[in-house]
Image (cartoon, rainbow, N blue to C red):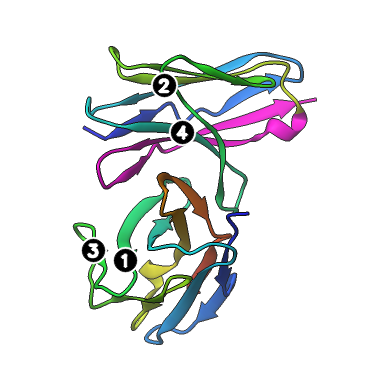
Amino acid sequence: GAVVSQHPSWVICKSGTSVKIECRSLDFQATTMFWYRQFPKQSLMLMATSNEGSKATYEQGVEKDKFLINHASLTLSTLTVTSAHPEDSSFYICSASYPASTDTQYFGPGTRLTVL
Amino acid sequence: RKEVEQDPGPFNVPEGATVAFNCTYSNSASQSFFWYRQDCRKEPKLLMSVYSSGNEDGRFTAQLNRASQYISLLIRDSKLSDSATYLCVVTGANNLFFGTGTRLTVIP
């Protein structure tokens, strides 16, 4: 159990385009999902916490208008990188937790974004 | 000061060796502690939770020292498949903090 999927697994796009990444909890309902970004040889950095049916909570320094998060259902959250630029190239990972065990995070396989 | 600090390594050890990683955290109110394993270009996977009493899972032993605010992971009889980055993770009330990870390479 506790499987989280992400789609796409990798994407290459031109500067200025928008990219949408989906995160799904396949076998459980996740009231909260998290979005992380990881640059090479660095730790995961939390970008935002996404709660079903409400606005996401963004970490300091993360532009909410650039990184749009939608958590429309208990099994799906999306992250849209708007007007992506080369500096947005990174590994984006989502995670979800069981409502009854919010500490343990189950991670999606990640999406590698390369902006040319 | 960072919330969680780890020695980034790399640690290069021969097969069969015992290796230990430490991690310190800054917030004494931290609630839960974990070790995750991350393979290159993959997502982190939970390795084990860390309890005050210490816990063991096969070749892996995790310990927590709340007084000194550090967590340790001991790997005995290292296997080639243990090569990965090991992330220390600490949770607060509403946050999850990751260490930078310690890279381990087990050499044949």
Q: Amino acid at mark 2?
A: Ile
- How far, Cα to Cα, is label 1 from label 3? 8 Å
Check if mark 2's residue and mark 3's residue have beta carbons within 8 Å.
no
Q: Which mark's residue is nearer the viewer, 1 or 3?
A: 1
Q: Amino acid at mark 1?
A: Asn
Chain letter of mark 4 equals B
Q: Amino acid at mark 4?
A: Phe
Check if mark 4's residue and mark 2's residue have beta carbons within 8 Å.
no
Q: Residue at x 30, y 61 (%)?
A: A48
- How far, Cα to Cα, is label 4 from label 1? 23 Å
Q: Which mark is residue A57?
A: 3
Q: Which mark's residue is nearer the viewer, 4 or 1?
A: 1
Mark 4 on the same chain as mark 1: no
Mark 4 on the same chain as mark 3: no
- Residue B106 lies in magenta, yes or no? yes
Q: Which mark is residue B71?
A: 2
Q: Earlier in the sequence, mark 4 or mark 2?
A: 4
What residue span does the magenta drawing correspond to? B80-108
Q: Earlier in the sequence, mark 1 or mark 3?
A: 1
- How far, Cα to Cα, is label 2 from label 3? 29 Å
Identify the residue position indicated by label 4 in the image.
B34
Mark 4 on the same chain as mark 2: yes
Q: Amino acid at mark 3?
A: Thr
- How far, Cα to Cα, is label 4 from label 3? 23 Å
Identify the residue position indicated by label 1 in the image.
A51
Q: Residue at x 62, y 45 (%)?
A: B39
Tell me the element at label 1.
strand
Judge from the rendering whether residue A56 lies leftward or rightward of residue B19; answer left or right: left
- How far, Cα to Cα, is label 4 from label 2? 9 Å
Along the viewing direction, whichever of B11 and B33 lies nearer the viewer: B33
Tell me the element at label 2.
strand
